[in-house]
Image (cartoon, grey):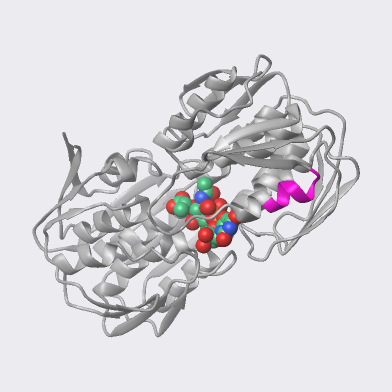
Amino acid sequence: METFTIEGGRPLSGTLRIQGAKNAALPILAAAVLAEGQFHIYDAPHLKDIEVMIEILSALGAKAVHADGCVSLDTTSISVTHVPDDLMGQMRSSIFLMGPLLARFGEVTISRPGGCAIGERRIDLHLSGLSALGAKIEEVEGYITFRATQLRGTNIFLSFPSVGATENIMMAAVYAKGTTRICNAAREPEIVDLQNFLNAMGARIRGAGTDTIEIDGVSSLRAVSYRVIPDRIVTGTHMLAAGIAQGHIELTNTIPEHLTALIEVVRSCGVEIKTHHDIMEIKSTARPNAIDRIITSPFPGFPTDLQAQMMVFLAQARGTSVIKETVFEGRFKHVNELARMGASIYVDLGTAFIRGVDRLSGAAVEATDLRAGAALVLAGLGAEGTTVVEEVCHIDRGYERLDWQLQQLGANIVRKT
Ligand code: EPZ
């Protein structure tokens, strides 16, 4: 088991270029299945989840190489429509293969996907969306098979603006006869990136970033080269790292308008944030002030993927703050670990009441999922003494060598095996 050992109390300083967005690269790699040819996907971060996606594509028959942030992918020889069970179970994003395989081959078989232990992770909206397009669904012994000779455009209303379901339906609908309209669609920037990628391939999609997306079916798509947007959650994580450890850092390759909700909150707590084109400058010289209330919600609201990191920031703030988690019901697993570091947090019915303390104390803690793990690293940066974070494999799923990234910003963090 690999761990991170962090010596707390050092203000951060330095510059870091932000990695490409995991949650944009994953659906984009899956969408490449929709066309035959040679793709080059740039700024695809070197992460466990990306490598699993590449393994899945190779198992389906594609040829893929991931070097220096670029995935070179030849999808010509894809012929398998059954996603291997062992790979399906390794991450939630394996479900993104459903729409593209169904659209290109008229058939797809998957088993129930895996994912973080942050909640039930239902897939009913994915299944009902594909059924609405005319696919026939069959579920036998845990395997879900969709078949369709020709998908037909239709209106689909999502009862919740699910990011994954929106993306799966977009990909399934590109070859459907007629127009598909997704109402109450998710509005995340990663969905806009997927629309831009698919339109570069020759699709006709509009409305991504709003709650209504329209897809006009086309007869063919072509392979392209494409650069993935920067990762807004990694950007926000480092912004909060500077707020927690204090100091003065610069982040490049960012899109500030993807983080409006976070920037507003962190500024109101007393941290200085300046933005200029794709550069963000963060300066903090004192303990932050508490904030009355944060409620996580779909974009453009406060992102659930930054809830744990924000909780660490508020755990050492002046005063008491409240965080309500409305997206995933099991996303407070970091609270018990933070209590081991001296945090004073009370959780009741999806709401955390955080009474700020002067400083946390270093301890041995365990990463339970991707973002909770990142939050514990941030807690170690600001804590008194030494913190050891165990099970860093969870963190490697979403951060491209978080230890190296933080070392660029002056942190004392070492990966140990
Ligand atoms: C995506 O997950 C992201 N993952 C998550 O990031 C992110 O937290 C989430 O969107 C919300 O922003 C990727 O993009 C790979 P959802 P996804 O479908 O698509 C319920 C990270 O840390 N729901 O919007 O799984 C579901 O149970 C990860 O990078 C249904 O009920 O999120 C949850 O409560 C974690 N039925 C809520 O919607 C469905 O069919 C949000 O899920 C689908 C979802």
Q: Is residue 47 shown above or below 235? A: above
* x and y percentages locating residue 176 in the rendered image: 84, 40
Q: Is residue 356 shown above or below 88? A: below
* x and y percentages locating residue 341 in the rendered image: 15, 65
Q: Mainly helix, strand or loop, the magenta region?
A: helix
Q: Which residues are magenta?
A: 128-134
At 57% from the left and 35% from the top, the residue drawn is 110
Residue 199 lies in magenta, yes or no?
no
Q: Nearer the viewer, residue 378 or 150?
A: 150
* x and y percentages locating residue 302 in the rendered image: 50, 68
Q: Quadrant of the C terminus?
A: top left
- Seen in the image, is 217 located left or right of residue 48? right
* x and y percentages locating residue 332 in the rendered image: 34, 66
Q: Is residue 243 shown above or below 395? A: below
Q: Nearer the viewer, residue 81 or 364?
A: 81
Q: Is residue 124 visible?
A: yes
The extreme left residue here reads 385
- Seen in the image, is 411 located left or right of residue 197? left
Q: Quadrant of the N terminus?
A: top left
Q: Nearer the viewer, residue 99 or 238?
A: 99
Q: Is residue 61 shown above or below 374? A: above
Quadrant of the image occupied by residue 74: top right
At 38% from the left and 43% from the top, the residue drawn is 399
Q: Is residue 256 visible?
A: no
Quadrant of the image occupied by residue 72: top right
- Seen in the image, is 359 located left or right of residue 213? left
The extreme front residue here reads 141
